[in-house]
């Protein structure tokens, strides 16, 4: 074990040993992989600026916030932690042994929830693990500067993870690994530790276009470029108002997020199952029926989805999303009755989507 203070000079051997210690401590905390990279993101900031200028972020104004004199803080780690010298990246698998995704997607009366959201919200768990890792490092090095990130600040996490050797950016824009696919969460620790970076891995997508071909809304407009305004995850999670009518039929029964690009990716055939019990499906969400979920009151929604990432969209958008799915569902009496019961919902947003769904089944409200 390395015993030293940050102010002491780390030679090449000491730095290599400390990196291996950090990897081991990370595994002990449940992380599936740990990588190291420096703060230089190269031309990533230019790519981000072009993507934002094209409006591909839609209503996600926070993506365009956090400006700096040079561009965007997302591409400048030292703006987030002055003196950043090394960024520790971490990967945590979330794939669960639940109902087959394609089986659920093929049953229009069931609700599809993105696999990452079936269990407890990953943000708190991942942040706590990263914080424990920073504390474990401090026991060996003495005081040092560190800041933990889990979607909590403007961080280009895929770019950092790619630079640190945890995988490569797939054509669907997600990080890919030959052994783990893409079913994992990412987190980072910005530090002032003088540790050398790991080598990036090469791209292994080749000529494959499975993710582009599978996207229901053609949101992957070209390899490595996603237009969020078309993405079902954006439409069901980020969009606060009405879902564009032209896109509603394409959502199918997807009520929270979309995994189609990942499901189609050949590398995910090798994705291992998670070891985290907290990510296991709750309340049967991996195979729930739309009619049952549509009947939840706001109190039931808040209670049953406590600790779930889904809860953040609120009951109103939950009902909006399910109304669209019911409009795309088979025309059965139970579906029609469920929609009719919400026809006078207090929310204009819900009423509008219910009216659309009923019209899809041949019923027009007065």
Image (cartoon, grey):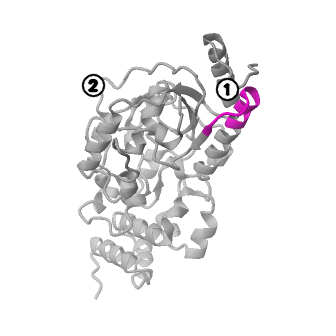
Secondary structure of the residue carrying numbered label 1: loop
In the image, 182 versus 288, the foreground residue is 182
**From where the camera sits, is residue 254 visible?**
no
In the image, 133 versus 313, the foreground residue is 133
Which residue: 58% across, 31% down?
Answer: 192
Q: Residues within 10 Å of mark 2 (few under 14, many from 20)?
A: few
Q: Give the range drawn in magenta.
A: 134-146
Residue located farthest toward the top when viewing the structure as drawn: 13
- Residue 207's label in the rendered image is 2
Q: Position of residue 60 (x, y in %)?
A: 37, 57
Q: Position of residue 84 (x, y in %)?
A: 53, 33
In the image, 237 versus 322, the foreground residue is 237
Q: Position of residue 118 (x, y in %)?
A: 56, 52
**From where the camera sits, is residue 267 visible?**
yes
Position of residue 270 relative to residue 262, above or below, is above
Position of residue 300 relative to residue 265, above or below, is below
User: Is 165 a magenta residue?
Assistant: no
Secondary structure of the residue carrying numbered label 2: loop
Which residue: 29% across, 40% down?
Answer: 225
Q: Is the magenta stretch mostly helix, strand or loop?
A: helix
Q: Quadrant of residue 48?
A: top left
Q: In which quarter of the image is residue 338?
A: bottom left
Which residue: 67% across, 36% down?
Answer: 134
Q: Where is residue 341 in the image (x, y as percent from the top left)?
A: 44, 81
Q: How crowded is mark 1: few (under 14 residues within 10 Å), some or many (20 or more)?
A: some
Going from N to C along the chain, the mark reached first, 2 or 1, is: 1
How far apart marks 2 and 1 lie (CA) works out to: 46 Å
- Residue 6's label in the rendered image is 1
Q: Is residue 165 toward the left or the right of residue 221 in the image?
A: right
Query: Which is in the foreground here, disc 2 or disc 1?
Result: 1
Q: Quadrant of residue 159?
A: top left
Position of residue 98 relative to residue 272, above or below, is below
């Amino acid at each position: 074990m390395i015993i030293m203070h940050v102010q002491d000079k780390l030679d090449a051997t000491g730095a290599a040993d400390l990196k291996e210690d950090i990897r081991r401590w990370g595994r002990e905390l449940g992380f599936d992989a740990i990588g190291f990279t420096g703060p230089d993101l190269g031309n990533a900031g230019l790519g981000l600026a072009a993507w934002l200028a094209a409006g591909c972020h839609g209503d996600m104004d926070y993506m365009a916030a956090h400006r700096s004199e040079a561009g965007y803080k997302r591409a400048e780690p030292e703006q987030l932690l002055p003196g950043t010298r090394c960024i520790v990246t971490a990967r945590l698998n979330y794939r669960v042994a639940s109902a087959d995704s394609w089986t659920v997607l093929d049953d229009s009366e069931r609700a599809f929830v993105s696999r990452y959201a079936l269990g407890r919200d990953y943000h708190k768990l991942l942040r706590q693990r990263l914080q424990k890792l920073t504390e474990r490092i401090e026991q060996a090095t003495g005081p040092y500067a560190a800041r933990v990130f889990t979607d909590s600040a403007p961080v280009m996490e895929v770019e950092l993870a790619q630079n640190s050797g945890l995988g490569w950016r797939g054509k669907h824009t997600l990080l890919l690994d030959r052994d783990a696919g893409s079913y994992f969460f990412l987190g980072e620790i910005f530090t002032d530790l003088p540790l050398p970076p790991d080598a990036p891995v090469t791209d292994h997508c080749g000529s494959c276009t499975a993710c582009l071909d599978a996207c229901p809304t053609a949101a992957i407009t070209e390899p490595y470029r996603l237009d969020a305004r078309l993405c079902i995850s954006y439409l069901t999670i980020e969009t606060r108002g009405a879902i564009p009518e032209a896109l509603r039929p394409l959502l199918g029964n997807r009520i929270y997020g979309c995994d189609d690009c990942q499901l189609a990716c050949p590398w995910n055939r090798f994705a291992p199952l998670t070891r985290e019990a907290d990510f296991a499906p709750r309340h049967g969400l991996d195979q729930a029926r739309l009619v049952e979920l549509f009947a939840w009151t706001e109190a039931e929604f808040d209670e049953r989805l406590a600790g779930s990432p889904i809860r953040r969209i609120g009951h109103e958008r939950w009902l909006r999303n399910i109304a669209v799915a019911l409009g795309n569902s088979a025309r059965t009496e139970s579906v029609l009755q469920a929609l009719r019961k919400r026809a006078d919902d207090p929310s204009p947003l819900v009423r509008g989507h219910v009216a659309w769904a009923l019209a899809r089944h041949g019923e027009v409200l007065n």
